[in-house]
Image (spheres, coloured by chain):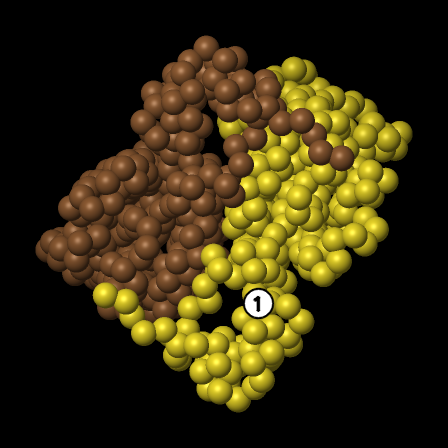
Chain colours: A yellow, B brown
Amino acid sequence: MTSTRATLMQVAERAGVSLASTSRALHGSGASKAMVERVVAAAAELGYSVDATGRSLRMKKTFQVAFAVADIGNPVYVDMMRAIHEVLAPQGYRVVVMSTGDTATSTAELVRSLSSGFVDGLIVSPLRTDDRLIAEIQRAPVPVVVIGRAMDDRGISSVSTDSAGGIGEALRHLYGIGRRRIGFLNGPLDTTPGSSRQRGFDAADHGEAERFDQEIADDFTVTAGLEAARRLLARRPDQQLDALVAANDLLAIGAIRAVRELGLSVPDDVAVTGMDDTEIGRVFQPSLTSVSLGSTERGRAAARLMLQLADDPDQPAQQVNVGPALRIRESTVLEGGE
Amino acid sequence: MTSTRATLMQVAERAGVSLASTSRALHGSGASKAMVERVVAAAAELGYSVDATGRSLRMKKTFQVAFAVADIGNPVYVDMMRAIHEVLAPQGYRVVVMSTGDTATSTAELVRSLSSGFVDGLIVSPLRTDDRLIAEIQRAPVPVVVIGRAMDDRGISSVSTDSAGGIGEALRHLYGIGRRRIGFLNGPLDTTPGSSRQRGFDAADHGEAERFDQEIADDFTVTAGLEAARRLLARRPDQQLDALVAANDLLAIGAIRAVRELGLSVPDDVAVTGMDDTEIGRVFQPSLTSVSLGSTERGRAAARLMLQLADDPDQPAQQVNVGPALRIRESTVLEGGE
């Protein structure tokens, strides 16, 4: 039994607009948001279903954009994903989220698989990058926007941030509130975030420090942060650290637990800073002082670059940079304190 | 310039297996895990790329399964997603994550859009269900497995849990540690989780209670939990509650913040329980006593049902139930305390 299907013409009549406008609105190309809403409402009332298989054969478009990240469980990507969705949905695009895995190779394989043609574009935030991955992005059959390292010099549109500068801001804050024994808790140095944060720590002015030290966590998770902070805090209890700078909020949450295991308090004995300004950091107790790297802004910028590339895949690669901003909260400065 | 592509025969020779086995392994149909690994390794060495467009035209298969949830930011779904991936990836399927939105209508529209044929199946966890959504699932062109309400009586394979019983377990624990003034913090009652948790609270034996009360949060987020808990705790400060049962971990984290705003401590003054046993609840301080609803087990069960339906879409609908289990932690019982 086949159901009766409304035609595109019936949708156009119901919406009270031209057939061409209806087609543009349903296909996400060049219609205003108001027009899209009007036509989509008419289509929904009539139970009109865009035949996407036929449509994609005609137009070679799927109206799907993939957002691929190493770890869907990391809350920094949730903000990015929501921002990407907010920009792309009104244009008729659906956002699907995929996992790249940890390595440059697994990420390159994902980019390669785009030849299957189930998305019109890919926004990818690689944890690690190598030449093969860059080559796969350069020859990908659909537009790719990278969130991470600047790659416009390789002909790849990308959205970057200055996490090195962000580590510098966290350090200036800690020295400014009188901390002099600083521990740095970084993630793996062969990752894009790990290497840039390390540059920031190494380049900072440690002139006021009595001691500084660092430890590398196995990855960017709470558990890895707890384990690495335990090692760091056990190293010289006679001259215990009074501040920990963590490479992201998850590592910082693990570090706070490690501090408390020693019977020390946050922030009185040890102040702790995170990075990424995630929701979990804001609701944690103590709430986390964290360096925002503009995850929402970066998501929006990447989505806008994707829309431009969807219009004109041959335009030159563009580069957008979003600067860091320190958010001071309870993990470094108690209310009414310091 | 076109690159030289390896043929399927070259992959078969490299893997040392038959052409048929190679094809089965690469197409995820009826090959052992060891065979798949061997053939995929050979394909990777040769840079062989399965032409999925051609493949899907021939086989009407995309080797993608969608996992659709209301809120990708809710950590309970991260555990499910990882479990689904673990079961499906060895069978050659990629998992893409999609957002259904909050409503039954938006979820029904997502199911309807599956006619576009970009996935071979859908695992969906609807926040709200209505007749139209059930009808769309029943006539979906690909297999659908529901995580949520049991729907086998409607011919839909589904994975359910007993969150009503889970609320009962949390209440027995709280009465057992001597709490007598119980507040229930639920989410919206017109949602599947909200209505089942409410049944659990209403059906529990409150014979030992001196007072019980409840408040409905606007949704299942930390912010909504904070606001609802503030209202609940402000109601009768003369006979303040000594325990809060929250409908999920995010509401519980909001509730802990509300308790502390009043200068009260968790768990000494007010014990707090969550539900879903999420990673954020485990790392929170105090760590959350929470009712596990087996999110990993439910994800695995849903993925296995999907594989069975992929083999035989006409088999009868199945129903899997995963029971609740209380995890007791610091938010109700301090170490060495009570």
Residue drawn at point x = 64 percent, y = 76 percent:
A32
Q: Nearer the viewer, residue B141 or B104?
A: B141
Q: Is residue A218 above or below residue A328?
A: above
Q: Residue B43 in the image: x percent, y percent?
A: 53, 22
Q: Chain of mark 1?
A: A
- The quarter in which the N terminus of chain A is drawn is bottom left
Residue drawn at point x = 54 percent, y = 57 percent:
A56
- Viewer can see residue B22: yes
Q: Residue A85 in the image: x percent, y percent?
A: 57, 59
Q: Residue A132 in the image: x percent, y percent?
A: 71, 27
Disc 1 residue type (three-letter): His
Q: Nearer the viewer, residue A192 or A157?
A: A157
Question: For residue A23, which quarter of the picture?
Answer: bottom right
Q: Residues within 10 Å of mark 1 (few under 14, many from 20)?
A: many
Q: Describe residue A197's horizontal placement relative to residue A10 as left or right.
A: right
Q: Is residue B45 above or below residue A334?
A: above
Q: Nearer the viewer, residue B248 or A93?
A: A93
Q: Residue B311 in the image: x percent, y percent?
A: 27, 37
Residue drawn at point x = 81 percent, y = 54 percent:
A315
At mark 1, the secondary structure is: helix
Pointer 1: what residue? A27
